[in-house]
Image (spheres, grey):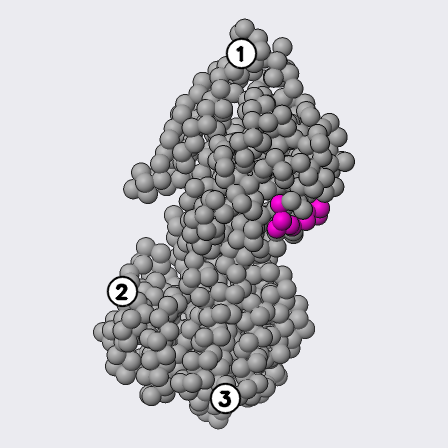
Amino acid sequence: MNGNPQLDERGELIHLLSLEGLSREMLHNILDRAEPFTAVAEREVKKVPLLRGKSVFNLFFENSTRTRTTFEIAAKRLSADVINLNINTSSAAKGESLLDTVDNLAAMQADMFVVRHASSGAPYLIAQHLAASGRRHIHVVNAGDGRHAHPTQGLLDMYTIRHYKKDFTRLTVAVVGDILHSRVARSQLHALATLGVPDIRLIGPKTLLPAEAARMIPAAPLAVCHDLAEGVRGADVVMTLRLQNERMQGALLPSPQEYFKSYGLTPERLALAKPDAIVLHPGPMNRGVEIDSTVADGRQAVILPQVTFGIAVRMAVMSMLAGTSGGAQ
Amino acid sequence: MKIAIQNGRVVDPAGGVDRGAGVFVADGKIVGVGETAPRGFQPEAVLDAGGCVVCPGLIDLSARLREPGFEYKATLESEMAAAAAGGVTRLVCPPDTDPPLDEPGLVEMLRYRARQPGFAQVHPVGALTVGLAGERLTEMAELAEAGCIAFGQANLSMTDTQVLMRAMQYAATFGFPVWLQAQDPHLASGGVAHDGAAAARLGLAGIPVLAETVALATTLQLARATGVRLHVRRLSSAAGLGMIRAARAEGLAVSCDITINHLHLCDRDIGFFDAHARLDPPLRATADRAALAAGLADGSIDALCSDHTPVDDDAKQQPFDEAEAGATGLELLLPLTLKWAEASGTPLVRALAKITSEPARILGLSTGCGCITPGAVADLCVFDPAAPFVVSRERLKSQGKNTPFLGRELRGEVRYTLTEGHLAYSADRLLG
C-alpha cells in the first residue's frame, strides 16, 4: 500500500485520511466548497439535501464528544442519517477486532464511516480493507487517528487562515506546543506546506518535538525553535496546540505551571507577532497552560470562528465524498 | 540412499570453491566431489543440476517454529516444509516459545519432534533466565546437554544488569555462548518504528538508535569483563555496527548477524502504515540500511539470518502499532542473499558464506557441516540463481504468510534440498 490510498485512479478523493498528498488545488477546492455552507448555518432551515438517504456512521474508538458532535451536525445539515457508535477500547479488547466491527457495520449498508481511533493509521487499515473486499463505495473520513492526522481539523484551520489572511504564500506561521503527540499539528503542517506558506516554525521543548522534526514533512520549510518569544516574532498566524493532561506532569514536562512559564501564549509574547496576527486553538483549551485567558478571549483569537467554520468544512468534505451533485442551493 | 547431483556449479564457501562438478552422496554423507563419481558408486537417484548452483544447505541463525505454544501461528510440519523449500537444512530457534525453552524436557521434546527425515536440524538457543524473566539463571549445563547451542533472551532485554553480568559469568564458566539482541527496554518503551523522519510524519512512537547503542555499550562491556563468547543478534543501526567494529579492533571476540529485512528495507518502506513492515528491531533509516549492507560485505557482520517469525493474519491485520512484529523468512533467505550479492557486486561464493559457512562457524559446527567435501554431512541446496518468482501467499509454504516482500519479484529458486542425504524438497515433485 505505497500509493496514496485516499485517491482513486483519476486523483479524485474517495476517502479523507490525511492531508498528505493532496494538491494545492484540491485543498482550495475543498475550502471553496465549504464557503456556501457557512451561509446554510445562518438560514432558518439549516439543511441541504445532498446526503439525503445516506447513512453516516460515527465510529469512535476513542471518546470525543466535541468532534463527534461537529461531524453529527455536519451530516445532519446534509440530511444524512447519523448513527453514533462509541466503541471503547476495553470492549474491543474483549473480542471483536477492528475489521470485524467494520464488516458488521458495512453490512448495515453504511455509506460513510467517520473514524476516530487511538492508533495512528487505523483509518488506512479500514479503507484498505474496504477496497480489498470490494466495498469502495463506503467512504472513510479520518476524525483523528493516534498522533497521525486530524485532516478536517487541519482543513478548518486552513479555512480560518484563508478567511482572515487570504494569501498563504506570504505568511509566517508559528505552531506552538506538543507537536510530538499532535495529530492536529501534522495535518496543519502538511496543509501549510502544500498551500505555499514559506516560513513555518515549530516551537516547543525538546521533549515534545519529534526526532528530526525539521524533516518530518518532506520539502516543507520547517524551522525548529525552543524559545516561544523568538518563534512568534513577526508571525502572522500563531497556532497553539492542546497539551493533554496526562503529559503535563512526568518525564516529558515537570508541571503545567512550568510549561506555561516557557510556552504559554501570553499577551506579552503575542505582542511580538505582527499586530494583526491571529491566534488559533483546536480546543478544548487549557487556560493558563498553553494559552492565557486574555489572549484566548482577546481580539486576535479566532477560536470560536474556527468551530463555526469546522461544520462547513466537514459538510464540504462529506458532500464531496458521498454527495449527489450540486452545492448548497 | 545414494544420490548423484550432476552438471551443477558447486559453490562451497568454506573451501572457496566455485567450479563445475558432480556431488555424490551416500548414507547421509558426501562421498565425492568432482568430474566423476567415486569408484564403484552406483546412484539410486540422479539429480540434474544443469544451470543450477550446488551449495551447502543454508544455516539460518534465527527462525521461529512457533512450537510449543503458538501452534495457531505455525507448526513444526509447516515450518519444516518452508525450510526445505527455502534450502535451509539447519536452523537456530530462539527460546521465546510458550513456555520458553528454559527446561531440558522442553528442549528434548522439540529436538525429538524435529528429528524426522527431511526436516532441518534444529539448534535451540536456551533461555538465559527462567521464563525469560531476567531474574533467575536457567540450568544451562542441563540445557546444553539437551541440545542448546547457546543461551539468550530472544527479543527480550535484561533490565537488571547485575543478573545479566552473572548470567554471562556463569555461561563463560562452561564456555557457553550468549546470544543477545541489543535493545534498551526503557528507551524502546512504547515504540513501534525507527525514531526518525518517517515515524515523525506518520505519528508513530519511535524507538531511537540509542536504544540499540546504549544496550550494546552495556553488553559489550559485560562481555569483555566476563570473557563470555557474545553473539549480537539482529543488529539494526550504523552506530551499533560501529561499536561492534570498535570492540573487535580492541580484541573482543564478538560475532553478529542482521536480518534479510534490515539488509533490504528501511523505515520508508512502512509507506502508509503497512503492518508488514512492523518488525523488531524496527527498520531503520536509509543510511543505516546502507551501512549494514556494507558491513555484511566487508565482514564486519558475520552472518545473515531470515529472522523467520510466522505471524497469523489476525495479529497482523491491525493498526500498525497494534500489529504483531515479525515476518516470514525461511523461503526468502536465499533469494534475498542473491539480491544483495547482485546489488553489491559480491561474488556468489562470498555471499553464500553468510548463510552457510559463517553461521556454521558461529555455531561451532565447522567440522563436517556447512561445506561440500568428502566426509561432510550431506546437507545440500541446489538452486537456479536466475529463475524469477513473485513472492505470494500461495507460494509460501510457511504458515506465516506475512512479509514486506509480498508481491515483489525475486530471483533464486530452490530445485532440491538434501538434509543428511535425504531428499527433503524437490521443485519437480515432493518426495516422502
Q: Chain of mark 2?
A: B
Q: Nearer the viewer, residue A256 or B179?
A: A256
Residue B179 drawn at (x, y percent): 41, 76
Residue B99: mark in rendering:
2
Rendered residue at 58%/38% (across/down): A265
* Residue A283 relative to residue B364: left or right: right
Q: Which residues are magenta?
A: A219-228
Question: Residue B106 appears in which quarter of the rendering?
Answer: bottom left
Rendered residue at 46%/35% (across/down): A116
> Label 3: which residue?
B373
Q: Nearer the viewer, residue A308 or A191?
A: A308
Q: Chain of mark 1?
A: A
The amino acid beneath tag 2 is: Pro
Q: Is residue A40 above or below residue A220?
A: above
Tell which residue pokes out farthest to the top in this image.
A44
Residue A258 visible in the current orientation: yes
The amino acid beneath tag 1 is: Lys
Residue A47: mark in rendering:
1
| Secondary element type, mark 2 | loop
